[in-house]
Amino acid sequence: MTECEKLANCSFVSCCDAYERSTAAKGFVSMYCKGNRMNDCVRKKLSNTFGKDVVPKNMMPNGSPLPGTQTDDWDERALHFRRYLG
Ligand code: SF4
């Protein structure tokens, strides 16, 4: 299994202290960025569909915010990704 082509520049893994504190977030890296759910990553789908500016830094690959972080400044398409990604 190769790793996601976006990993080197993915803002999720360099997001913030919340990432460093979250064991869940690190688990997502194994599952998505370096694992077999890579193509299910909501960040990747949003980026490929609407451009990287729509992807919040603190969004995890499953589309949820990193634990302890807010979604106040999230784009509508990120907040309601299920509606927009179909
Ligand atoms: S969070 Fe998604 S886009 Fe970023 S490196 Fe991981 S799989 Fe790729």
Image: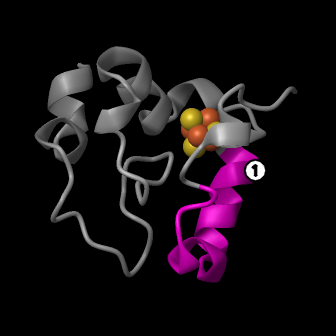
Of 46 and 10, the residue lying toward us = 10
Q: Is residue 69 above or below residue 80?
A: below
The residue pinned by badge 1 equals 30
**Residue 72 position in % (x across, y down):** 15, 65
> What residue lies at 12% left-to-right and 41% top-to-bottom?
76
Kindly identify the amino acid type of the residue bearing the numbered disc 1.
Answer: Ser
Q: How many marks?
A: 1
**Residue 25 lies in the magenta stretch:** yes
Q: Is residue 22 above or below residue 11?
A: below
**Residue 65 position in % (x across, y down):** 37, 62
Q: Main secondary structure of the magenta part?
A: helix
Q: Which quarter holds ligand 1?
A: top right
List the single residue furthest toward the right. 1
> What residue lies at 56% left-to-right and 80% top-to-bottom?
17
Quarter of the picture containing the C terminus is top left
Q: Is residue 17 above or below residue 10?
A: below
The residue range painted magenta reads 13-31
Position of 50 compared to 44: left or right? left
Q: Quadrant of residue 24?
A: bottom right
Of 22 and 9, the residue lying toward us = 9
